[in-house]
Image: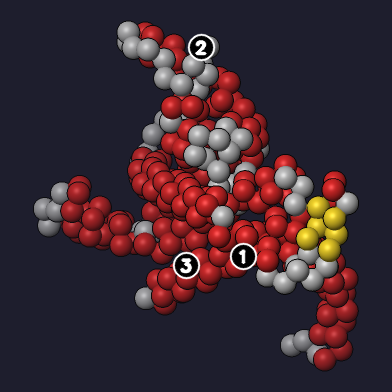
Amino acid sequence: MATQHSRSAARLMMAPAVILLLGWMLVPLVMTLYFSFMDYRPLRGIAECCVGFQNYERFITSSSFADSVGVTLIMVGGILAITVIGGVLLAMLLDQPMWGQGIVRILVIAPFFVMPTVSALVWKNMFMDPVNGVLAHVWRFFGAAPHDWLSQSPLFSIILIVSWQWLPFATLILLTAIQSLDSEQLEASEMDGAGFLSRFWFIVLPHLARAITVVVLIQTIFLLSIFAEIFVTTQGSFGTRTLTYLIYQRVLESQNVGLGSAGGILAVILANIIAIFLMRIVGRNLDA
């Protein structure tokens, strides 16, 4: 049993790391909050303090704000649908005995470790290029005109790129959950005459409910801040400007630090609201 002295020593040794972590998190947040109440445009030499909530009002009332929130939600929802459904199917496939099972699992999980910028460049230049891309050659092989993905289907293209990155994560979590399923339940249901779809719907899917909620929670938190894929492929054009990219445009392209900082605080608030909502759902599933 730990004594009072050992606990005090542990707190003392952890203090530098905790202080550093809090400083790394709080200092940028406090500075962003401070700038959000300023009219700060450094290239124009404007740095007026205490403009109140004018930046927040301008950011919320602009037409770009509602559009960017809608694009963000559509993008997150589409990615979650593809990764969860695809993750369940891949997890069930990888759970079956096959030759080279370990190698196949490594290859399936590999895209998760590719940097977002690199994967976006690969998809943009190797697959979605309307002239020399792989998909363009496939289209020509079947006698069809090549499809310019990033200009004709930009939102779907980004959803596809990001889904390819996050599908391994969902597959890994769901595969672990499937492997924890009691095989006796499946064998008993099969002896009772239950078909594959019945076993999946009434046994496998309820067992995966907790893992699916965890996947949705973790992915949503990260997907709300999608930036690199948009910057590399469409740069926010063709209706792909998310809330994160809108903030980037306000801060760096328009050089309006105050307005961009207000957007950043609003994004943090919205992300926390969504995270709290999802955490409650996860908590209910874990307690069930």
Quickly name the residue at label 2.
131
Q: CA distance from mark 1 to mark 2?
A: 45 Å
Q: Secondary structure at mark 2?
A: loop
Decide which of tag 3 and tag 1 comes sooner along the chain: 1
Q: Secondary structure at mark 3?
A: helix
Q: Name the outermost residue toward the left.
A: 193
Q: Is residue 38 visible?
A: yes
Quickly name the residue at label 1.
57
Q: Is residue 223 visible?
A: no
Residue type pointed to by label 1:
Glu
Q: Nearer the viewer, mark 1 or mark 2?
A: 1
Residue type pointed to by label 3:
Leu
What residue is at 88 percent from the left and 51 percent from the top? 45
What residue is at 38 percent from the left and 54 percent from the top? 178
Local crowd size for mark 1, using a 10 Å CA cut-off: few (<14), some (14–19), many (≥20): few
The tag on residue 116 is none
CB atoms of marks 1 and 2 within 8 Å: no
| Tag count | 3
Residue 12 lies, in percent from the top left, at: 88, 79
Residue 182: quarter of image? bottom left
Residue type pointed to by label 2:
Val
Q: Secondary structure at mark 1?
A: helix
Figure check: 251 above or below 129: below
Figure check: 212 above or below 15: above
Residue 181: quarter of image? bottom left
